[in-house]
Amino acid sequence: MAHYPAGAPVAVLTTQPLDRALDYRAPAGGVTEGDFVKVPLGPRTVLGVVWGPAEGDWPIEKLRPILTVLDVPPMRPEFRDFLERAGGYTLTPLVAMLRLALRAPGLGEPPGKRKVYALGTGEPDRRTEARDKVLDVLRDRPADVFGATELAEAAGVSAGVVKGLVASGAVLEQALARDADFPPLDPARPGKPLALDQADAAETLRAAIRAGGYGTTLLKGVTGSGKTEVYLEAVAECLARGRQALVLLPEIALTAEFLTRVEARFGARPAEWHSGVTQAERRRTWRKAAEGQARLVVGARSSLYLPFRDLGLIVVDEEHDTSYKQEDGVLYSARDMAVLRAACEGAQVVLASATPSLETWANAEQGKYARLDLTSRFGEARMPKLRAIDMRAEELPSGRWVSPTLQAAIEQRLIDGEQSLIFLNRRGYAPVTLCRACGQQVGCHQCDARMVEHRFQRRLMCHQCGETAPIPETCPSCGVEGKMAVAGPGVERMGEEVATLFPEARMAILSSDLFGSARALKARVEEIAAGGADIVVGTQLVAKGHNFPNLTLVGVIDADLGLQGSDLRAAERTFQLMRQVSGRAGRADKPGVALLQTYQPEHPVIRAILSGDEEGFWAEEAAQRRAAGVPPFGRMAGIVISDPDQRTAFALGEALARRAEVMEEVGAEVFGPAPAPIARIRGRHRVRLLVKAPRQSPIQAALARWVAQVEVPRSARLSIDIDPQSFL
């Protein structure tokens, strides 16, 4: 990395919304390329990175000096290369990519001592609800490091409550060195005994890490086959060689069980990076990743943008999961960016899934990725039997959704002392609230979307913008009282039906909007796994890697739900979701059964799910996608224009469509403009254009030239989504 002496002109890329780096003078002592610095910008002081020599021709004496060089390792050239290439691929300005890499508060604070708080040995002089909340947080999160403000925020109380508990000795206040080291991980500790196919897969991954360099491997294993234990062996090899590892998980609720497994394997907890950790912990993880002391990080998709000193392995667990796609701000796929980051770092990637995405499957078929298969469950566990319940032959009264066949199966599980899961991929109580007098459905004032009733919260909620409203007693349209009714089931309404059908059973509802924090959700999942419920009613949240040892029956209420609509990935996602949720059954020594309620048992996707012919399904789906020229055998990009005024949004879309020759030059087709399926969100009207191109078409450069031809009004927003996952 180049060094610039004192007074030398250098370019500094800041996190501010500018279109370029700015020139400054190096301070006394000089700076190194990649240094994190504070610089003046107007009346403010902002954070930035020394990006290289000055780009302008300003006289040196007119350049403002860099104020401070932060006491953290410089940004490595490999990481800068990744940010530039990721920004180029997603058509994201470099300053926006830099903001992703600097999501840690207080980086410029000097080292020193700070006060942190832990559970004490004393008793409060008086008990209050607020004080109990603080104590509950400290009991539930013993590994977290809390300052007074962070502890108060986590408990939802004032900082004064924390101070009162300190005075009584119930909470211990202690001084901690800033950015204290993480406890060492021991890769030499023995892991769990592996079956033969697991041991072979683990050795293949270890050999790839020993060989060094970049490579990507699909680790495909049926649910419960021990994929985690296999890739933890790869993590151990990486750590033994002095490099760092990153494990991405799709859901915060999965981290508790995973961290326990990591601690059992390596003797200490890894660093965490997700929305559930405190700001102080995020800052410590960021710095220790840069220093190389955070050897293993477990995190959400944003952890890809940590400044690792020597990243040797990235694991993307449940790589097919749609939550790896960032749908606002910087639009990117964490799975694809993991592969890009590894290529820049000379690292290995493991993409683990029981139901891989078609993109990953196709790359393995074409030899771009290696592939390892685990075909059987670990130990005594066996794959569940899958059967369809033909709803056309079932007799159900109005307002009921649990078929007699499924009801009988659940009753048998209750007799046997086993758990059942009822799966419905709809949050809330009911998807539609309507007036029986005029037929009007209650919609969101800000969006072209129905309001969903959440009866537990006594509110209607828009799942697009988050707007809420009281449940109306009179029709907002015609004013008639007493005629409001709901249509269709959500997971809360299913809970009511289950409580009616099985009044003696202990029931738990798992849906993301029913828990105030990730901590509360994790605690409930752990309680269920320990036997704290007889029947679980859940959304797709329950399909994501949870292990309930005593759960032997899965009942899917509407297996056809995902097959509706025109999404090109509808078949793939339905197949993945049904196979994943079915895999929750029979994960220990008791056999499992999955019953799929369907009105289309002859549908090719339902037949593929029931037959278990995964390779046949992927091959057929790939053939259809190849014939249509769509991903992964073609390129796609979505352009979404939004504006408070519908005519302005359409005018901009039409202006783009008239200038589509630049896209046609690279073999691309442009469709639209057309109203987005959800044509208004948060009061902004939305217009979409879709670009479809051959696989090798250089669409990024063409897209940049295309949109540069039009002037975007100040009120409008234009976003480009490369490889869109959602078409709403």
Image (spheres, helix red, strand yellow):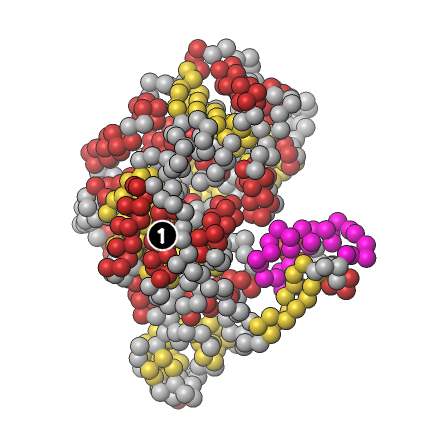
Q: Position of residue 87 (x, y in %)?
A: 33, 59
**Residue under circle 1?**
233
Can residue 654 be seen from the camera position used here? no
Residue at image point 23% right, 59% down: 211
Looking at the rendered structure, the secondary structure element under dot 1 is helix
For the image, the number of numbered tags is 1
Q: Is residue 551 above or below residue 644?
A: above
Is residue 138 a member of the stretch shown in magenta? yes
Q: Quadrant of residue 387?
A: top left
- Residue type pointed to by label 1: Glu
Q: Residue furthest right?
A: 125
Residue at image point 41% right, 87% down: 29
Is residue 69 a member of the stretch shown in magenta? no
Residue at image point 50% right, 46% down: 257
Range of the magenta residues?
123-151
512 sits to left or right of 170 = left
- Depth check: 509 or 629 in front? 509
Residue at image point 48% right, 39% down: 546
Q: Position of residue 192 (x, y in %)?
A: 41, 47
Query: The C terminus appears in which quarter of the rendering?
Result: top left
